[in-house]
Image (cartoon, helix red, strand yellow):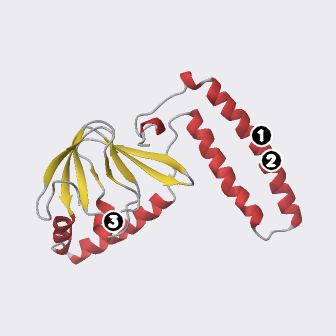
Amino acid sequence: MAPGVDDNTIEVVTYPKGKVLFKQGEKGDAAYIVQSGAVGMYREAQGRKIPLATVRKGELFGEMAVIDASPRLATAFALEESSVMVIPIDIMLDKLRKADPFIKAMISMLMNNLRGVHESYMPKSRSMADAVNMLARQADIVTRFLAADMPANVRTDLTARLKGLDGVIKDLKKVAATHREEDRRDEAIPAESELPQ
């Protein structure tokens, strides 16, 4: 349960910069609305932390795990000192129980759709380096097709093209590293350097 919050009270809690509100995979016991500051979200996948979003004043987060009792899809942490309204699970579920059956069915359908999107979600590029890293991850996915049963000529063609792509990706990484200072940044998602260690 969120610190300082009982089952039937909505409270505003202030978290210091860097404080983790909840972790990916945990059971959801509360939803949150940002009152001030900013909360960063990231997922852990394939041995790395992938920045997803920055949640700002007035925005709701953490509700999906509360509504459908599934594990948290991401980790949330305070990017700066942040005050959030903590809405305990009992209050959320009570509101849902009182909702029209049609509305409940729609919420359930939307949650399933959102989870599907989150599972396949690729964060938008923050920089040229991010875009090149995403290209490398996609190349890894294509490489897995080599393990499938396929005709020899297809395997040979795919292997040759992946080898060429690997060279291009290495070159692009060098370009991105060389021009890091001029690279465009976007504040829509936290930088990897801002993620908790």
Judge left or right: residue 129 versus residue 126. Answer: right
Mark 1 to mark 3: distance in Å? 43 Å
Q: Mark 1 points at which residue?
A: 167
SS under mark 3: loop
Mark 2 to mark 1: distance in Å? 7 Å
Question: Alpha-carbon neighbours of circle 2 within 10 Å: few (<14), some, or many (≥20)?
Answer: few
Q: In which quarter of the image is residue 89?
A: bottom left
Percent from the top left, x then y, of residue 119?
Answer: 49, 61
Looking at the picture, tell me which residue is in the foreground, 3 or 42.
3
Give the mark nearest the N terminus, 2 or 3.
Answer: 3
Instruction: Indicate the amino acid at tag 3.
Output: Lys
The label on residue 163 is 2
Please give the count of numbered marks on the rendered protein: 3
The residue lying at 66 percent from left, 57 percent from top is: 141
Q: Mark 3 points at which residue?
A: 27
Indicate which label's residue lies in the foreground, 1 or 3: 3
Judge left or right: residue 190 versus residue 162. Answer: left
Give the mark nearest the N terminus, 1 or 3.
Answer: 3
The residue lying at 16 percent from left, 68 percent from top is: 95
Instruction: Indicate the amino acid at tag 1.
Output: Gly
The residue lying at 15 percent from left, 57 percent from top is: 5
Looking at the picture, tell me which residue is in the foreground, 6 or 104.
6
Q: In which quarter of the image is the C terminus?
A: top left
- The vertical placement of 170 against 116, above or below, is above
Q: In which quarter of the image is the N terminus?
A: bottom left
